[in-house]
Image (cartoon, rainbow, N blue to C red):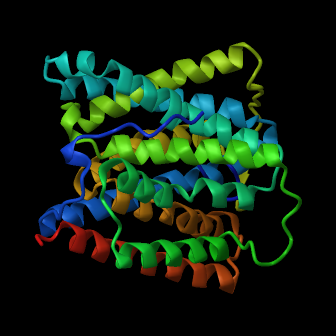
Amino acid sequence: MSAVTPDAGASTGAPLPATGRSAAVRTPPTRRLTTGLVLAGVSAAAFSLSGVFASGLLDTGWSPGAMVLVRVALAAVVVLPLGIMSLRGDWSPVRRNLGLIGIYGAVSVAGCQFAYFSAVQYMPVGPALLIEYTAPAAVVLWFWLRHGQRPTRATIAGTLLAAVGLVLVLDLVSGTQGAVDPLGIAWALVAMLAVSTYFVINANADTGLPPLALAAGGLTTASLALGLLGATGIMPLTYSTDSPVYAGTEVAWWLPLVGLGVVTAALAYVAGIAAGRRLGPRLSSFVGLFEVVAAIGFAWLLLGELPRPVQLVGGVLILAGVIAVQAGEKRSAAPS
C-alpha cells in the first residue's frame, strides 16, 4: 500500500471487487478484535517506515520507482516460501483465485505505487495523500451501495473526525501547499481506489487463500508488473551505492533497502491481510490511517523532524474517529 516518500510514506485503480458474506461486518470475539487491532497497527507502523527509509536513498540518487521495485521484489522473495508452505500442498485455492491474486498484485500493490508517484509529479505530497487516504470513506460507501450495509451515525461521525484529523496531520491548513493540477487529482483518485481495493480484498476470507499465500501471490505479481514498467521506461529506474545518512550517521546503502523489503512490504502486507480477516474492511481501513501518524512519529525519532502541535491534534482526532467507527461496526452487527 504505502508509497515510499520522505514526507509520509503513502500507497491503477479498478472497481472494488464484490466480496462474499465474510466481508460483511460482524462483531468478532474480544480476543479476535484485539488481535486484529494489533495486527492493523503493526501493518500501519511498518508501512509508515517506508518514508524514513526512502529519505536517505532519495538523497543519494535513487529514483522512487527503483526503490519501489526493489522493495516489492525483496518482499516477494521473503514471503513466497512462506506462502507456499501455508498452502500445505493444496494449490486449489490459488487456481480458484488467480484473477483475484492478479488484481491484488497489479492494482492494490503495484498500481497504487505507480498512481501515487504519478500524482505527486503534478501536485504537492500533502493533498495527494489526503485524496489517497479517503479510501476508508470509499470502503464505507462501497459496502453501502454494493451490499446494502448502511453506515451507522457513529460510523459517519468517525469518518468525519478521521477526515479532519487527516487534514491536520498532513498540515494542509498552513496554506503552504502549491497549486493542484487536475491530472494530479485524477492520479490520486486512482491511488485511492487501489488502496480501497486493498482493504476489501484483505477482508475476504471466502477465497480460502491463507493470508501468506495471498501476500506472496500479490507481491510476486506486483514485482512482475513494476519490472515491466521499469523495463519499458515508463517508470524511471536509477540507483546509487553511496551511503545514505540517517540522523547524521552513514549506513550501508543496502541496509535501508532490506528495511523497505522486509519491514515496510513483507511484514506490512502480511499483517494487513491478517488484520483485515479479523476486523473487516471498514474498521481495518480506518486503523490504516495511523500510517500517516506513525510516519510523522518515525520521522521525528529517526530524522529529527519535530511534528507541529496541529499534527498532534490531528492524530488524536484520527484515534477518536477509529473508536467511533469501531462502535458503529458493533451497532451495525448487533441483532435487531
Task: Determine which quarter of the picture holds residue 217.
Answer: top left
The foreground one among 219 and 261 is 219
Quarter of the image where one finds residue 279: bottom left
Q: Can you give x and y, in whole percent of width and height, for residue 189 in the image? A: 64, 47
Do we see residue 104 in this rendering? yes
The residue lying at 14 percent from left, 18 percent from top is 90
> Which quadrant holds the C terminus?
bottom left
Task: Where is residue 137? Give x, y as percent.
Answer: 49, 61
Q: Residue at x 61, y 28 (%)?
A: 69
Q: Quadrant of residue 172?
A: bottom right
Picture layout, residue 163 above or below residue 215: below
Percent from the top left, x then y, of residue 222?
51, 26
Please tell me which residue lies in front, 61 or 252: 61
Asked if 274 appears above or below 41 in the picture, the reply is above
Q: Residue at x 35, y 40 (%)?
A: 201
Residue shown at 31%/57% (left/top)?
Answer: 39
Q: Is residue 267 left or right of residue 19?
A: right
The correct choice, above or below, for 145 with respect to 116 in the image is: below
Where is residue 140 shown, x and y percent of the image? 41, 59
Q: How many marks?
A: 0
Q: Is residue 169 left or right of residue 124?
A: left
Could you tell me if residue 248 is visible in this image?
no
Q: Is residue 101 left or right of residue 122?
A: left
